[in-house]
Amino acid sequence: MADSLILWDIDGTLVNMDNAGERALLTSIKELYARDLGEKLPVDLKGRTDTSIARDLLAFLGVADGPEEVTRFTSTYLSHLPTSMPAGKARVLAGIHNALEAIHAHPEIHQALLTGNLEAGAKLKLSYLDLWKYFEFGAFADDSHLRNELGPFALARAMEKLGITFPPERVWIIGDTPHDIACGKAIGAKTIAVATGSFAIAELSALNPTHTFADLSDTQALLGVIL
């Protein structure tokens, strides 16, 4: 059997960070721009890249969103993330430990990340919940603010790290939002949608992913789809 590559989303797919990222962003806005937005951000976060979110927030605040200001904002966000995570009840989602272990143990399946998080943010979140060890590489918001552009970065790193060129039919993107499905389709990959985030199974199924799960608690069912 030819090797397969699994590209995992993070928030709502692997973990629920209990709004740690939102808290860190709100604290950053207070610190940098002296604006108190309460407990809720005025932009949609679901499935989007950190850099895209930062641009939208700066526009809302009336701050010029040049590259230097985006970097200043996101760096401040990353500095607050370590203290915002313990303030909530972050958790690994159902079945994820078993799924990651099973894929890690399988000689013909490789796994990496394809996420809207900045790489440093991804490492902070997954290290906090002891999952970072499963991922050798990935594609992140550092690569592009457009999620649909992240797939080629992941495939290039797979070639660099593993020495394997994965054809689209051997690539699986697993995520919990329409953005995950769209970025998989953008590279011709197969997609697994999981309803462990903010979108219901019916909403995800309507976008025609390759497969949809309510959650990933059944490891054998997940492997059955991939294999």
Image (spheres, rainbow, N blue to C red):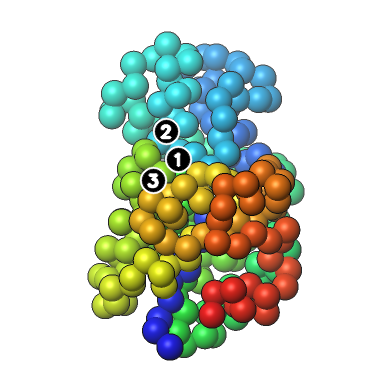
Residue type of the residue flagged with mark 1: Thr
Viewer-nearest of discs 3 and 2: 3
Percent of width and height locating residue 92: 68, 60
Q: Amino acid at mark 3?
A: Asn
- Name the element at disc 2: helix
What residue is shown at x 26% (from left), y 77% (from top)?
A: 163
Dividing the picture into quadrants, the one containing residue 26 is top right
Residue at numbered disc 2: 52
- Amino acid, disc 2: Ser
Name, please, the residue furthest toward the top: 62
Residue that numbered label 3 is attached to: 148
Secondary structure at badge 3 equals helix
Residue of label 1:
49
Q: State the CA–CA distance, disc 1 to disc 3.
A: 10 Å
Q: Using residue 87 as the reference point, say whether residue 136 is left or right of it.
A: left
Residue 117: x and y in percent read 47, 46
| 201 or 81: nearer the viewer | 201
Q: Is residue 103 left or right of residue 15?
A: left
